[in-house]
Image (tube, helix red, strand yellow):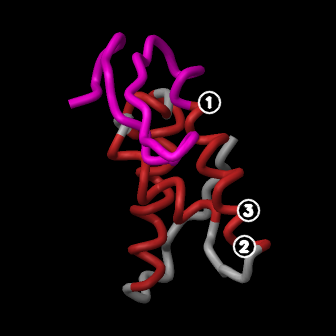
Amino acid sequence: MYHTYPYKAQIPVLIDGSYQKRTFTSNDDVWAVIELIIAETKQANLEGGSFSIGSSVMAQLPFFACSNIMADSQSQKDISRYIFNTERKSKGDEKWLKIKIQ
């Protein structure tokens, strides 16, 4: 849905009592909304919540962006290798490889 720029999406953060619809033209626009989610999560935690910032961002990201366009191809390869090796380790495979994510 949000695979190419530009596109419009409603952001999942209340601003002045409403959820705004924005035009996204680059990753910078997506990061601006992620910053709003981070600020909202921190404020909720100050008010007694116990929310994970990472979980909050990942849960709300699909409402306004595609996570695939947020990570370059090298990052996606690193994540895939990490998951593959973690699965091998959890299956008791003694030959699993430790990788360095750059």
Q: Amino acid at mark 2?
A: Asn
- Which mark, by number, is residue 86? none
Instruction: Kindly state the secondary structure of the residue where label 1 is placed.
Output: helix
**From mark 3 to mark 1, how far is it between C-alphas?**
16 Å
The residue carrying pointer 1 sits among few (fewer than 14), some (14 to 19) or many (20 or more) residues within 10 Å by Cα, namely few
Q: Residue lying furthest right in this view?
A: 46
Decide: is 67 above or below 41: above
Decide: is 15 above or below 97: above
Residue at horizontal 33 percent and vertical 44 percent from the top: 63
Task: Point out the image quarter for the C terminus.
Answer: top right
**Are the residues at dot 3 and dot 2 in contact (C-beta closer than 8 Å)?**
yes
Instruction: Kindly state the secondary structure of the residue where label 2 is placed.
Output: helix
Residue underneath mark 3 = 42
Question: Does residue 21 appear left or right of residue 56 in this picture?
Answer: left
Decide: is 44 above or below 101: below
Instruction: Say which quarter of the image contains residue 48.
Output: bottom right
Using the image as rendered, state which of residue 68 and residue 96 is in the foreground: 68
Instruction: Say which quarter of the image contains residue 54.
Output: bottom right
Residue underneath mark 1 = 32
Q: Position of residue 79 (x, y in %)?
A: 48, 50
Residue underneath mark 2 = 45
Query: What residue span does the magenta drawing correspond to?
Result: 1-30
The residue carrying pointer 3 sits among few (fewer than 14), some (14 to 19) or many (20 or more) residues within 10 Å by Cα, namely some
N-terminal-most mark, 3 or 1: 1
Q: Let me know if residue 3 is in the magenta part.
A: yes
Decide: is 94 above or below 75: below
**From mark 1 to mark 2, how far is it between C-alphas?**
20 Å
Q: Position of residue 20 (x, y in %)?
A: 43, 33
Q: Amino acid at mark 1?
A: Ala
N-terminal-most mark, 1 or 2: 1
Residue at horizontal 73 percent and vertical 62 percent from the top: 42
Q: Amino acid at mark 3?
A: Lys
